[in-house]
Amino acid sequence: MEPRQVLTTRICHLSLRVRNLKRSVAFYCELFGAVVAGSPTVNGSAHLSISPANPALPSFAIVLVEVLPPGIEVFGLDHFGLEVHGETEVRNLFQAAIALGANATQPRMYNGHFQTFIFDPDGYKIEVLAT
């Protein structure tokens, strides 16, 4: 049997399990300019849209689902990456994350790109990079 060929155009969304929906929505809206799509919460979830600075590029959706009880560790997802325009924007997001009380790694050059890792309120790792 031959493997099926799937022609993917892009990743359309990422779904994250969170402990506190309101806190996570505020984090993504404040730090990345995400916009809540539709009603803020539907069945314990929120759909957020992040639009790139270049309108020719597609937006990216993050679905936050409130299902993690306290004490349960997040597993299965290492990180997701968001590309930004230049080193300055990486540094700006690092500073904004720190101001929000988030943990983040010091911005640095790594593997040919400038990046930082920002940790959201549930411990998900977000790589912010400029190539």
Image: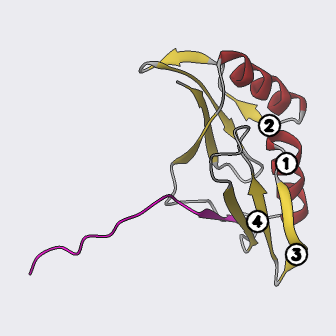
- Return the x and y of residue 26 as percentages of the image width and height: 90, 52
- The answer to if 9 sits in the magenta stretch is yes
The tag earlier along the polypeptide, 1 or 4, is: 1
Q: Secondary structure at mark 1?
A: helix
Q: Earlier in the sequence, mark 2 or mark 1?
A: 1
The structure residue drawn at horizontal position 64% and vertical position 50%, both measured from the top left corner, is 124
* 2 is higher (above) or lower (below) than 48: below
Residue located 89% across and 36% down the image: 100
What residue is rendered at 72% in x and 54% in y?
122
Q: Is residue 39 left or right of residue 72?
A: right
**On-image quarter of the N terminus:** bottom left
Q: Position of residue 50 (x, y in %)?
A: 74, 51
User: In the displayed image of the protein, which residue is found farthest to the left?
Assistant: 1
Q: Position of residue 77 (x, y in %)?
A: 52, 56
Q: Secondary structure at mark 4?
A: loop
Q: Are marks 3 and 1 in contact (CB under 8 Å)?
A: no
Q: Which residue is mark 2?
A: 102
Which mark is drawn over residue 27? Answer: 1
Whether label 2 touches label 1, CB < 8 Å? yes
Q: Which mark is residue 70?
A: 4
Label 3 close to label 2 by CB (< 8 Å): no
Examine the image and state in which quarter residue 64 appears: bottom right
Residue beneath disc 3: 41
